[in-house]
Image (cartoon, helix red, strand yellow):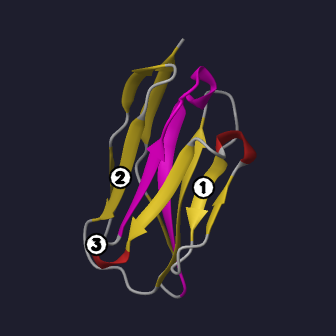
Amino acid sequence: QVQLVESGGGLVQAGGSLRLSCAASGTIFSINAMGWYRQAPGKQREVVAAITRSGVTNYVDSVKGRFTISRDNAKNTVYLQMNSLKPEDTAVYYCKFWTGSSGDYWGQGTQVTVSS
C-alpha cells in the first residue's frame, strides 16, 4: 500500500526556517492537488497550503508571505518552505494528496516546534 512519508520537521527558534518534504512511497496515479495541513494541541486541523497539478497555489492568511508550497510531479513529492517561523506555527504538519479515483492520501505527520 502506498504511503506518504514526511520529513523535515523539528525544533527551531522564532524567525528561523524549516523545509518539509512529503513523498509517496510508490506510484500514485492521477494526483490532482497536494497540500499541507497542521493541527496544534487543542485545535482543529486546518489547511495551510495547497497546490494544483498546474501549480496554482493557495495559502491560509496566517502564513501568506512566509510559507511557500511547491511540488515535483515527476517525484510525486510536495514541499513546504517555512520562513520567519512564529511560535503560533507550532503544530503537527500533515501532507495530503487528492486524487480523482484513488481516494485521498495522508502523511503520518511531522512535528514542528517554534520556540520564542
Which contiguous range is marked in magenta? 77-100
Q: CA distance from mark 3 to mark 2?
A: 11 Å
Q: Residues within 10 Å of mark 2 (few under 14, many from 20)?
A: many
Query: x, y (%) of residue 51?
Result: 56, 67
Left or right: residue 104 versus residue 79 is right
Q: Is residue 4 visible?
A: no
Residue at which label 2 appears: 21
The N terminus lies in which quarter of the figure?
A: bottom left
Residue at which label 1 appears: 49
| Residue found at x 45% / y 46% | 81
The tag earlier along the polypeptide, 3 or 1, is: 1
In the rendered view, tell whether residue 1 sits above or below residue 93.
below
The amino acid beneath tag 1 is: Ala
| Residue found at x 58% / y 31% | 89
Residue at which label 3 appears: 75
Q: Residues within 10 Å of mark 3 (few under 14, many from 20)?
A: few
The amino acid beneath tag 2 is: Ser
